[in-house]
Amino acid sequence: MKTGMVRVGVIIFVLSLLVGCATTKDVEHLQGQIGDLQQKVDILRGRVTSEMQQNWVNFETSQGELRQDIKILRANIEEDRQFLNKIANDLDALKKTYEAKGYAVTRGKEGDVAVTPLPATTPSPSVSTAIPPKEEPKDDMEGVYQKAFGTFKKGEYPNALKQFEAFLLAYPQSEYADNAQYWIGECYYQQGDYEKAIVEYEKVMKKYPKGDKVPSALLKQGFAFLDLGDRADAKLIFNKIMKDYPQSPQAEIAGKKLKTLN
């Protein structure tokens, strides 16, 4: 009886050892799986964080480019406004000139302008009823420029390019010459010919260094270099804008762009 009890005790002891060994192996295996899973989670978390950061950078860059496009659009609208104001002032001055000579200037429903003799209170041989020759050299110049600018705004860049080039040939010393040269560069830029755009923007600085289009030409030249992958020259130009034209809208755009490049 005692021998049987001893045997049972030995068997239970051996079984407990075997169970203990199996449990330890299972725990170690489970711990290994948990460690592998934790490592994968860490890798995935790092990847997600990196992608989120990159997406945020891309978002900020897109926002910056959108704000830049809006500023350029506002600058173009302001140029249109100034141009139209100038035309209105010139027409008003021309109207007064004709009225001083005894002619009435009226505008039709379609916007056409008619010049007719004013009724004479007393016959006067010195006043001719014939309509005087149309004085239009200045009007022609503005009309040619406005036509080219209108073509550009329609997105017809090849035609606009030809019209601006023709304008410069006809009126090389006009007050719109620097504007026309700038828009020639824009025509090339909008067509993706960034190298030619850079050359044409450079002509704005060289031929019209005191013109009001120089900051805009510099800014777009910098963007053209960026589009060609030349970050170094782009940064030089953006820094030049901030140094030479610190109070201009172009300097603000250049400064923000530099932050994304540094």
Image: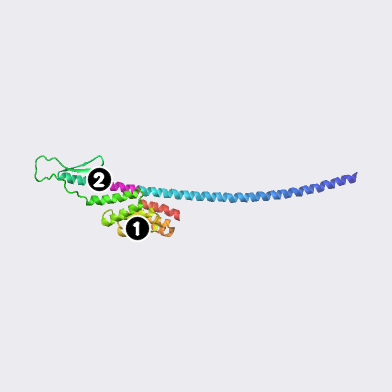
Kindly indicate whether the residue at mark 2 contacts the one at mark 1 (C-beta within 8 angstroms): no
Q: Read off the residue under disc 1.
A: 200
* Residue 245 as seen in the image, left or right of residue 19: left
As helix, strand or loop, the secondary structure at mark 2 comes to helix
Q: Quadrant of residue 167?
A: bottom left
Image x and y of residue 109, in percent: 25, 39
Residue placed at 53% from the left, 50% from the top?
Answer: 51
* Residue 91 as seen in the image, left or right of residue 51: left
Residue type, numbered disc 2:
Ala
Specify how the rendered protein is coloured.
rainbow
Tell me the CA gap for discs 1 and 2: 31 Å
Image x and y of residue 66, in percent: 42, 48
Q: Is residue 80 magenta?
A: yes
Residue placed at 50% from the left, 49% from the top?
Answer: 55
- Towards the viewer: 165 or 239: 165
Residue 95 in sight here: yes
Read off the magenta span: 74-86
Image x and y of residue 26, in percent: 72, 48
* Residue 262 as seen in the image, left or right of residue 48: left
Q: Is residue 231 magenta?
A: no
Q: Quadrant of residue 210?
A: bottom left
Residue type, numbered disc 1:
Glu
Image x and y of residue 207, in percent: 30, 59
Q: Residues within 10 Å of mark 2 (few under 14, many from 20)?
A: few
Q: Read off the residue under disc 2.
A: 88
Residue 177 in sight here: no
